[in-house]
Image (cartoon, rainbow, N blue to C red):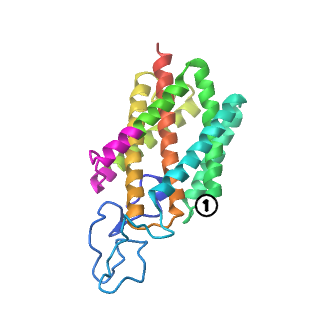
Amino acid sequence: MRSSNPVFSRRGFSRDNGSAGFNATQQPQAGNPYATNPYAQQAQTAGQPYAAPAPAQPQAGRMTIDDVVSRTGMTVGLVVVAAAFAWITDLSLGLAIGAALVAMVLALVQSFKRKAVPALILAYAAFEGLFLGAISNYIDGYVNGAAMQAVLGTMAVFAAVLVMYKTRIIRVTQRFYRFVMAAAIGFILLMGVNLLFAVFGGGDGLGFRSGGMGILFGVIGIVLGALFLALDFKQVEDGIAYGAPREESWLAAFGLTLTLVWIYLEFLRLIAILQGDN
């Protein structure tokens, strides 16, 4: 089973018969003591072949929550700094679109690499920030305060999902994963079709990004982003529990940044539609 986040699509922090992450307490398969933990040490203590690392005493070189928080702070912070630069310098939309394309390429390159490359991740954050700053400045020129509202909305969604995940109101299971993936695939396909109609037919294509349909799909996009956050939190939790290498924290930060950018853009689009209709 693959994660909804492209960062984790080539790896799972825990495995259950090839599935990533949802049955962390299951016993290893007979004859293979490392089947459920890809990061288990090959040398186990005598009499405890299946012992897992103690969460309270993380091993040196293993990912911790502090690593994830610090790396995420760096990537999101770089996005904010680059966005502020683009806003202040009034970066043109043409250059912003170019920056978005570069960011997309960098994200894809990192997603297909087996290990984290911090330089790629930070470069992605910088170019993505340039795009976000320019597009936010453009929309804010028509809808005053749209960018700040989108920032506050993104922060609120992040905090709400984190609280619901930690209190187990949201439980990430295989059924949850399949539902999110099916919804995400359908959403992306519809947006792709709408884009094609817009490019070749002009206007807003099938109307999925304007008017009442635009509002509906904006809300759906934000909800999907929130569900992606829950999957990201699960991947981070499993990575820490199973002793993932410290460099995996860069991938966790990358994945969280991708999801936060998704939510922010959906909020920005939704606010522009709502305010534009007033």
Q: Residue furthest bottom?
A: 46
- How far across and how far down the image is residue 210, in percent? 47, 24
Q: Residue furthest front?
A: 57
On the question of residue 264 being in view, the answer is yes
- How far across and how far down the image is residue 255, in percent? 49, 51
- How far across and how far down the image is residue 150, in percent? 49, 29
Image quarter where the N terminus lies is bottom left
Is residue 162 inside the magenta stretch?
yes
- How far across and how far down the image is residue 258, in percent? 51, 46
Is residue 146 inside the magenta stretch?
no
The residue carrying mark 1 is 117
- Residues 162 and 146: in front is 162
Q: Is residue 205 above or below residue 179?
A: above
Q: Which region is colored magenta?
A: 159-178
Q: Residue furthest right?
A: 89
Majority secondary structure of magenta residues? helix
Q: Is residue 75 above or below residue 208?
A: below
Quick one: SS at disc 1?
A: loop
Occupied quadrant, residue 111: bottom right
Q: Is residue 58 above or below residue 251?
A: below
On the question of residue 194 being in view, the answer is no
